[in-house]
Amino acid sequence: MLSNKFMMQKHLKIFFLILFGTFFLANNSLAYGNHQPLEIIAPKEAGTGNPAIPSTHRVFRAYPGIQYEFKAQVIGGTYPYVFSLSNAPEGMTIDRKTGVIIWPNPQQDANDIQITVHDKNGTSISSTWDIDVTTNGFIFVDANAQDGGNGTLNSPYNKINDFSSRNATDIVCFREGTYNLPVRGDYTVGNASGYVWSSPTDAPHKWIAYPGEDVTIDLTNNRLFYGAPSDASFYFEGLRFYRGREYFFRSSSSANYATFYNCVFDTLTLERTNYNSNQGAYFTMHSGVGYYLVFQNCRFTGFRGPQAIGSIYDNVKILVENCTVDDFVRPEDSATNQVMAFKVCIRNLTFRRNEIILPENSSYGIMGGSTNSLLGFDSVHGNVDSQDIEISYNHFRNYADSEMIRLNSADETKRTWFYRNTISTGKLVMRGLEYPDDCDGPWYFENNVFQNSDRGISYHYSSSPDAYQCIGTHSNNLGESSGLVNSGGFLINRDLVGTYGWEIAESEYWNDGEADVTSPSSPTGLSVS
């Protein structure tokens, strides 16, 4: 018969094995992510999707001998993704981690190219698309060219006004230089005049920079862009938009497949202070539901009062990915009070892998301020709740230990997942939660890093004392006042990379045979809130 001492040791050993196993699984499971179906927004076959991607989209055309580039637009599943191509034309490659497609020297049409995306779980999805390699439908502009050009590669225009009457579906390719935006149309806001697209057939609205060349679109003299087309598939790539006032772009909320890729929005100021007219780099006016608004690899800098992205109304399946926000200052008389204003009737927003750095004394909240919100709701606009919001793999830093992010600012945000983010300084504040009558959400917080004086989530005074019970999931988050991450948002304990916060470990990518997959080390000596 076994002794009591031996039995106790055996039971303790089993207990600790179960405890460690549970801890390990909790911290290496796929509890976060996989909330929405894996979907390729683009590239995909022309005419497919709901709404259908138009055949005039930029992804379907290349100019002979000029590098073609497109970053795959993917939402849903469990991030990170692994990308691959099959049946690709000679020389075309895709970065397996970022999804950037490069075709250095297109010479002839390519049909039935297939892109496949595997998520972290190994779930995959594929789509095919064709590329027409043609000189038709391309316009070239060169600031150094002589007057009188015809818009071809060898005889380019030299200013924006030259192509204002050309076909709306044309792709405008800018050579290196600075281009002043002309006043066009009679739309005015304050002292700002607009370059106006009033219909889907009005002037080209696909602008790209010639590969490797620096292009600046100067909006001086208080000008702005204004767009109304619903099926125009805006596309802007590789451009620096400089010295805007009030807005860089205003568009109907019903616009579909609008893309801003690798653009810089530099220096945007207010014309009207103490008056909130949703000023920001891109504002979608409330005028119907739009799908597939995409910002990738963009930078927002030098803003003095306006929002970065926003205000955004009535949009579904938004992707904001790999963008940077810095040098934001809110003057005392600023009418806006947030950097990212995804405001009314927002559904299926993916806000992923972005870095937002606020300077000292900026007085900004990142995602919602005292009256407006990142994920808000306004009953004036049709009783459609904002919901299915994923905020993941981002780094947020405020140079003061004050409010950085406010969620539920309008008290009506529904399903929201906040996971694998790092807040290196600043607070995440929940507003308007009243348990058990008005919790909204549900809210899910998983595998985040909160480095702030609260060591986690804060609750606005508008919330009830027991508001924490409104949180659906609050698991495996690290929370300390200091010592978790450095000023760059990188974990000091490198064994934790791939489990907590915005950093991604190589082992998290699906094993497609190109990389060895090893389990991340289990953390030791840390408390988990």
Image (spheres, helix red, strand yellow):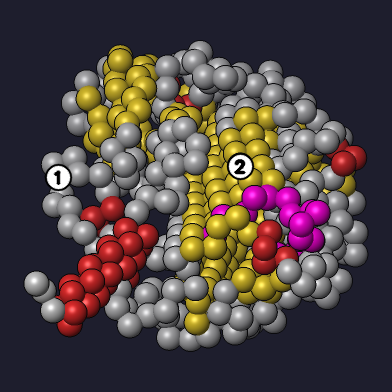
**Was residue 437 drawn as part of the magenta stretch in this picture?**
yes
| Of marks 2 and 1, the one in the foreground | 2
Q: Is residue 334 visible?
A: no
The mark total stands at 2
User: Which residue position is annotated with label 1?
Assistant: 514
Q: Position of residue 262 (x, y in %)?
A: 47, 48
Q: Which residues are magenta?
A: 430-445
Q: Amino acid at mark 1?
A: Glu
**Relative height, residue 332 to residue 236 (above, below):** below
Picture quadrant where residue 496 is located: bottom left
Q: CA distance from mark 2 to mark 1?
A: 33 Å
> Which mark identifies residue 266?
none
> On the picture, is 309 further left or further right than 53?
right
Magenta: main secondary structure equals loop
**Was residue 37 drawn as part of the magenta stretch in this picture?**
no
Q: Position of residue 9 (x, y in %)?
A: 19, 78
User: Which residue position is annotated with label 2?
Assistant: 388
For the residue labelled by badge 1, is the local secondary structure a helix, a strand or a loop? loop
Residue at 64%, 50% in the rendered image: 442
Residue at 50%, 77% in the rendered image: 479
Q: Position of residue 192 (x, y in %)?
A: 83, 49
Q: Amino acid at mark 2?
A: Asp
Picture quadrant where residue 154 is located: top left
Q: Is residue 259 visible?
A: yes
Looking at this view, is 211 or 113 the one in front?
113
